[in-house]
Image (tube, rainbow, N blue to C red):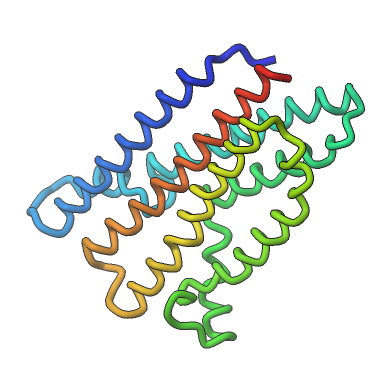
Amino acid sequence: MINLSPKQVIRFLIFIIIGLSITSIIGQFFEYYIQHDSQELIDKLNVDGEYTIPSLFSSFSLLSCSVILGLISRKKLQNKDKYTRKWIGLSVIFFYLALDETISLHEQLIHPLRKLLNATGIFYYTWVIPGLILVIAVALIYWKFVQALPPKIKYLFFLSAIFYVGGAIGMEMINGYYSYLYDSEMFVYEILVTIEEFFEMLGVVVFIYALLCYLKLD
């Protein structure tokens, strides 16, 4: 189906996310501490923004997951596999995540929910509350499915989930707490956001690796 070396792909993608993270930090350092005339370039390299190089990379990575999952789903459908719907569901989930990464749908929940719940502290970025609920729901729905995967693939699925959810929700809660106590317009905050985005991207890259490894086994 897909003739790609999983190891070569993950090495290449990890090299990219490290590069994106480092250039974003350097750009933010210039933003806060050094006079410059490169604001447009700095903005394009910032991991904490929409329609930037890092956000486009993240969107493309998530969409790639959706496409690979779609290919797996088609094969499972042909073989009448009992987990076909689960594979299709994952493809749909990652398509939504790619869309959300592009236009930040989840951030539209922050202000209405914050006002409704009077949220502070780690829940200052209030979208993490429904986000946690959805993560738990997906984990329960997919538990038996993941347990049925080959051991190596199961381990990689768990590892990618830890990285992605740890970044997207775990670090987001830390960032929200910092923003609530201090200010989001600070270099320390930019470092925290870069760590968040790095783990999100790493989680997706590990998942791509897992899917490519699965295709080699299947």
Q: Is residue 184 above or below residue 168?
A: below
Q: Quadrant of the C terminus?
A: top right
Name the residue: 38% across, 44% down.
52
Q: Residue 4 at x, y = what percent?
A: 56, 15
Q: Quadrant of the N terminus?
A: top right
Q: Is residue 164 left or right of residue 143?
A: left
Q: Is residue 18 left or right of residue 83?
A: left
Which residue is more in the foreground, 166 or 46? 166
Q: Is residue 109 above or below residue 15?
A: below
Name the residue: 65% across, 42% down.
95
Q: Residue 216 at x, y = what percent?
A: 65, 17
**Res 8 → quadrant:** top left
**Res 89 → quadrant:** top right
Name the residue: 46% across, 26% down.
10
Q: Is residue 22 above or below residue 80?
A: below
Q: Residue 14 at x, y = what percent?
A: 39, 31
